[in-house]
Image (cartoon, rainbow, N blue to C red):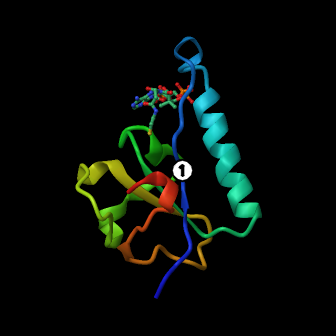
Amino acid sequence: MAHRALCLAPCAVRPEQQRTGAGSAAVRAALSAAQRLGEHHVVVLGHPAYYPRFGFTRASDSGIRLTIDVPDEALMALTLDAGHPLPSGTVRYAAPFGI
Ligand SMILES: CC(C)(COP(=O)(O)OP(=O)(O)OC[C@H]1O[C@@H](n2cnc3c(N)ncnc32)[C@H](O)[C@@H]1OP(=O)(O)O)[C@@H](O)C(=O)NCCC(=O)NCCS
């Protein structure tokens, strides 16, 4: 069964503005907007020390994987709705991602 999900990426802050809260504000705004729009799930491929603060957990713990090899801890997932727990399965990115 297929489940629709969002991909949070890429996320970057200009070097001179980093560590001022801009990245966190942008991520929180994006996740809030997604929740308001009724989205249920988000995946991110990124720094495992950064994204857990937004609620992301290691995707493999939920049986979620990619079609390519990535460091296990770098693929994370989040549910925006407690009524829709993370489904297990393989993430298939939209064609423009080239994955
Ligand atoms: C990662 C990034 C988006 C974070 O944005 P930011 O505005 O600098 O971060 P914030 O000010 O909101 O948050 C600061 C926190 O993020 C942590 N952090 C920043 N960059 C980090 C990184 N590369 N890895 C892990 N943690 C990072 C800081 O240690 C700080 O943690 P603390 O709150 O526990 O002290 C930004 O540093 C960036 O653009 N980095 C280069 C591009 C990149 O690596 N993007 C990620 C692709 S997935």
Q: Nearer the viewer, residue 82 or 93?
A: 93
* 19 relative to 60, above or below: above
- Taking the image as shown, residue 56 lies to the left or right of residue 88, namely right
The three-letter code of the residue at mark 1 reads Leu
Residue holding disc 1: 8
The percent coordinates of residue 88 (x first, y second) are 38, 77
The percent coordinates of residue 32 (x first, y second) are 71, 53
The percent coordinates of residue 42 (x first, y second) are 53, 60
Report which quarter residue 16 is drawn in.
top right
* Image point (54%, 50%), residue name: 8
Q: Nearer the viewer, residue 45 or 58?
A: 45
* 9 relative to 98, above or below: above
* Image point (52%, 45%), residue name: 9
The percent coordinates of residue 78 (x first, y second) are 50, 61
Tell me the quarter of the image containing the C terminus.
bottom left
- Outermost residue to the right: 36
* Image point (26%, 51%), residue name: 70
- Outermost residue to the bottom: 1
* 93 relative to 11, above or below: below
* Image point (60%, 20%), residue name: 20
SS class, disc 1: loop
Count of labels in the image: 1
